[in-house]
Amino acid sequence: MNYVLKGMPLVAFIVLATAGCARDGFYHDRNLDYDEAGKNAPLVLPDARNVERYRDAMPVPEVSGTRSAEQGVVEAPLPQSLSPGRIMERGYVERREIGDDSWLVVGAEPATVWPELERFARSRDLTITASDSRRGILDTHQARLSVRPALRSGDSEIRCEQGGIPQAACLTALERHFEARSMSSSAASLAAQRADTQDRARFERRGDEWQVTLPFEVDRLWSELSHQLELDFAVEGRRELLERNPTSHSFLVRYLTRSERQRGLLRSLATLNLGESTHQIRLMLEARGPEETVLKAQSVDEEALSTEDQRELLERVAGLLR
């Protein structure tokens, strides 16, 4: 016992010495550095620099407006569809067509696509006459190259036109260019240049009917939905794309509604038989302006859709654009 008591002063001395090392010794507390850190002047590049070699690595787009909550309530965005057909690597390139119009959809932000458009023009020895990165327009003697946010968040639309007419050979060359270059590494790090997904779809109930207003031109929206429905509505007995009509901007689908799924579940608990039946439903797009389209769902069968089933189906279809 006496030996233990004699060692106590030595233990206390070691504890105090160790505590004194927390600032400048072996156990440096970096939290103090953050508290005492000062600000340095920002780096300034010389005016004589070559502007072609220096650009913003992570450009921040301008905000067109702020979204105010109505009565203090903000509607949460819809979840992204997890359909296996929609799972694609960023950087994919796809062709879109409707009538005589055609363009490309690239799985990358416009901020990522724009430098690639410039690189494409230089590699093809195109004579650039005007360049506007904010508008996403690159004019050359041969054609006008342009990029803008696509309907789906995170994607971009690329066009190559001459006098407003799409140039097929130019689009093919652009398609090969973007397929050859990997867009996935930089797409995740660049700032988004897309509209808030909560503002893309505006759901409205009028009597017993739901409709959703989308801020897109009707032909452009029909073309994108045609592609997305072909991928997502491909599950037999659950959801299927039967017909599509570009003239009337409509689609005919076979869909297992939420109320039918719930009834089937109750039947299965009692009889071990799902007994689910699908409905044929027509999805219709109606132009309300140059950049506004209304999407509606109407039953083709004798049984009308309930308001809950309308809302659930429209949410799924509108979610394909997110």
Image: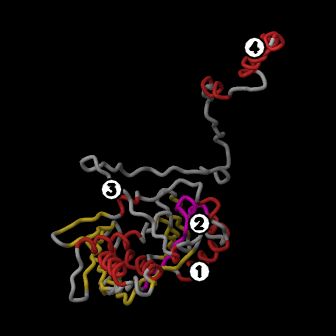
- The residue under label 4 is 12
Label 3 – label 1 distance at C-alpha: 41 Å
Residue 227 belongs to magenta span:
no
Q: Which residues are magenta?
A: 100-117
Amino acid beneath label 2: Leu
Q: Which residue is mark 1?
A: 172
- For residue 109: magenta? yes
Image location of residue 147, percent across then percent down: 50, 66
Which residue is denoted by mark 3 in the rendering? 75
Q: Nearer the viewer, mark 3 or mark 1?
A: 3
Disc tally is 4
Q: Dot 2: within a 10 Å radius of its alpha carbon, few (fewer than 14), some, or many (20 or more) residues?
A: many
Q: Nearer the viewer, mark 4 or mark 1?
A: 4
What residue appears at the point 73 percent right and 26 percent down from the top-left corner? 28
Q: Nearer the viewer, mark 4 or mark 3?
A: 4
Q: Residues within 10 Å of mark 4 (few under 14, many from 20)?
A: few
Crowding at mark 3 (Cα within 10 Å: few <14, some 14-19, many 20+):
few
Q: Please state which amino acid type lies under the numbered disc 1.
A: Thr
Give the residue pinned by disc 2: 117
Separation of residues labelled 2 and 4 (CA atoms):
69 Å
Mark-to-mark CA distance, 4 and 1: 78 Å
In the rendered image, which quarter contains the C terminus? bottom left
Circle 3 SS class: loop
Q: Give residue 157's position: percent from left, percent from top.
A: 49, 70
Residue neighbourhood size for the residue with mark 1, other residues' Cα within 10 Å, grouped as few (<14), some (14–19), many (≥20): some
Task: Give me the disc on residue 248.
Answer: none
